[in-house]
Amino acid sequence: MSKPQAKRLTNDCFAALDTLMPHEEAMALLRARVRPVVDKETVPLAAALGRVLAEDVIAPRDIPAFANAAMDGIAVRHADLDPERETVLPVVMTVFAGDVPDPLPERAVARIFTGAPMPAGADTCIMQEDVIFEGDVVRIPPGARKGINVRPAGEDQQAGQPVVTAGTQLRGPELAAIASAGVGDVPVFRPLKVAIVSSGNEIVRPGTPWAPGRIYDANHYILRGAMAGLPVDIIDLGILPDERAAVEAAFRKAAAMVDVIVTSAGVSQGEADYMAETVARLGHLHAWRLAIKPGKPIAFGQIGDVVVLGLPGNPVAAFVTFLMYGWPVLSRLAGCAWREPARLVLPAAFAMPKRKQGRREFLRGWTEADAQGRTVVQRFPKDGSGLISSAVAATGLIELTEEMPAVRPGDPVRFIPFGAFGIGPK
């Protein structure tokens, strides 16, 4: 599929002041400047799971389109019921789901089944367990509330209102809502094409025999996993050697076939780090120095219309910075409404007697029950950004804001479950 022809992002989209930028300032800048870069297409509803809706789906009629019974029982006019004593009325019709019943006469009831249309005139459905059928009549005890067990027309959706709004990534419930409106084909954004690139002469893929000085490429797999819930097609560009010509050739090739290039390592100013140099030479590169831990240096850039996201080389730093910055950016580029992960506020089950203020910190942690049965947050005991074991043990990130001088057991802290990124609990 060809890439979008129109220019979608300005060349300075990711330009930022050359200062240590706070987390909230970085998010505000990204939220203001990033927008979708993918084209629209129409697909059958059955093929739309996980795709991003490109246009609102409008209800063509009320849903449900008619008042219907929520229970098996009888349909009756509430005005025909004696509020003080038993009412006995004839059963004059039976209504099944799919029927188009005649109006209900006064002083009569209809036998009705779940989902069947309420006959005109009937305004109350009394469940069958609460009445007594005797031949062609029914005995109805007093006390039934008017309108009970009736689903009114338009209770779920009203005609002319959006059933699902543009920018929503479609799950089963959204597909069901669209199906209930009778829509068989939906306008969606095509999947965002994302290339993942690793670099370094020392990096090799799992399955390669180990040798002194070699490091297995964990970053590719942790980043691929972090993208699992996103509407993206991933292209593996493999491992690039520390050679200027090889890096440039790979970037030129990728820029002709994808929307986003995600790299890890190689974006520093080291002598053999050609990633940053190449992006700057082929397009624009902005190195963001963020007041965060882990992962202070992040690079945002562009080669033409292709966005380049350069992440730290340590696997946990790459993972955390992708979740906090790459995930919302890629979501928006793919057509989603801007989204950030929901935070839970829970008591801490750990202590940090003193911490450096002025930076946003993301610890790896999990929830557990304390002795009183309360849900609390526990942290992994080590902070190293190369410790993949911390991400393995964690079910989410503990977010410590810039102004927190310390954490004591019981203090409220923010917890971001990995499920908030669509990658599920541990």
Image (cartoon, rainbow, N blue to C red):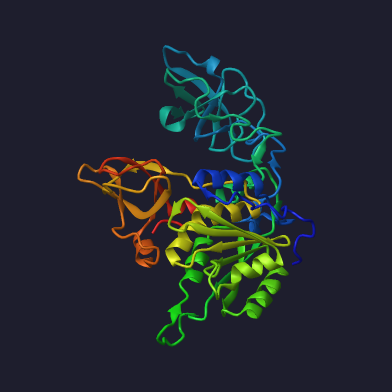
Looking at the image, which residue is at 76% across and 66% down? 2
173 w.r.t. 285: above or below: above
Looking at the image, which residue is at 61% across and 50% down? 16
Can you give x and y, in whole percent of width and height, for residue 388 in the image? 38, 67
Residue 202 visible somewhere in the drawing: yes
Seen in the image, is 236 located left or right of residue 408? right
Q: Quadrant of residue 244?
A: bottom right
Q: Which of the image's four quarters has the C terminus?
A: bottom left
Residue 422 visible somewhere in the drawing: no
Circle count: 0
Seen in the image, is 373 located left or right of residue 31? left
Depth check: 298 or 2 in front?
Answer: 298
Looking at the image, which residue is at 57% across and 21% down? 108
Depth check: 370 or 347 in front?
Answer: 347
Looking at the image, which residue is at 35% across and 43% down? 413
Depth check: 331 or 93 in front?
Answer: 331
Q: Residue furthest top?
A: 84
Q: Residue furthest left?
A: 371
Q: Which of the image's four quarters has the N terminus?
A: bottom right
117 w.r.t. 327: above or below: above
Can you give x and y, in whole percent of width and height, for residue 20 in the image? 51, 50
Can you give x and y, in whole percent of width and height, for residue 107 in the image? 57, 18
Can you give x and y, in whole percent of width and height, for residue 343 in the image? 44, 44
Q: Quadrant of residue 83?
A: top left
Q: Residue furthest right?
A: 5
